[in-house]
Amino acid sequence: MGPKQIIYGHLADVAQALGHAHRLELLEHLAQGERSVEELSARSGLTFANTSRHLQILRRARLVNADRRGKRIIYSLAGESEVTGLIHALGRVGERNVAEIDRVMADYFRARDALEAVSREDLIARMQDGLVTILDVRPRDEFDAGHLPGALNIPLSELADRLAELPDAREVVAYCRGPWCVLSFEAVAALRERGLQSRRLEDGFPEWKAAGLPIEAVQQGVAR
């Protein structure tokens, strides 16, 4: 077997590890920050045994790392930028080539927000000019693990009760876990219903971080 065939064989192993919806969802959760098997099980709705089995497959493909801390095993992405980029590329191919994905995008995502999302470059310019309020609608623990600089964290479930925290005079740009995360779509829809100018970031926190842009983490207490 030649070197090219050996490489293709290993790439096929990686592709096979990605070939399950539950494993893609687990990677999305890990893109927000490291998690234990118990936490991933609770977030994904999978049993502990099923979650552990999927994580072992991802680990064998070297898509995730496992670190034992006492009695717990903590998982994290193995190469955040590369894995996030791989999932992003897979999504772009799927949106272009798979008719069912395009139908879901039209029926759910585009139906809820026909406006063009804010690009990272545009958001950076608005941040520098102080023209925007950045709204992180993920759960608090994900926000604490890492978020966009200066972002305000209001989880979607709390948004209706905390609208007074949002300045009326500035546009709100909401983001969450990634380009197909429904949290930011629902947040933008709720804000517009209440007369607030609001748009989505084109993707989410993992893509922002993978691009090498600055983030803040409450746990460290400093910007990185």
Image (spheres, rainbow, N blue to C red):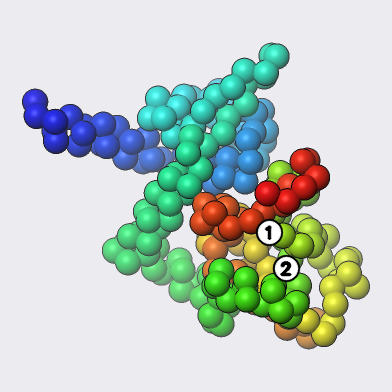
> Could you say where residue 133 lies in the image, as x and y percent from the top left?
76, 72
Q: Position of residue 66 (x, y in %)?
A: 55, 24
Give the answer, above or below, for where 79 lies relative to 52: below
Q: Nearer the viewer, residue 57 or 111?
A: 57
Quadrant housing the N terminus: top left
User: 10 Å neighbourhood of mark 2: few (<14), some, or many (≥20)?
Assistant: many
Question: Which residue shows up at 85% across the image and 77% down it?
Answer: 167
Estimate the spatial distance between the alpha carbons at disc 1 and disc 2, rounded to whole Å.
8 Å
Residue 143 drawn above or below residue 4: below
Residue that numbered label 2 is attached to: 134
Residue 120 in sight here: yes
The 10 Å Cα crowd at callout 1, few under 14, some 14 to 19, many 20 or more, is many
Numbered marks: total: 2
Where on the picture, by quarter, is residue 47?
Answer: top right
Q: Is residue 62 left or right of residue 129?
A: left
Q: Residue at x 21, y 34 (%)?
A: 7
The secondary structure type at the circle numbered 2 is strand
The disc placed on residue 58 is none
Relative to 36, is 164 on the left or the right? right
- Residue type, mark 1 in image: Leu
Q: Residue at x 46, y 68 (%)?
A: 105
Q: Which residue is mark 1?
A: 148
Of the image marks 1 and 2, the number of the one nearer the N terminus: 2
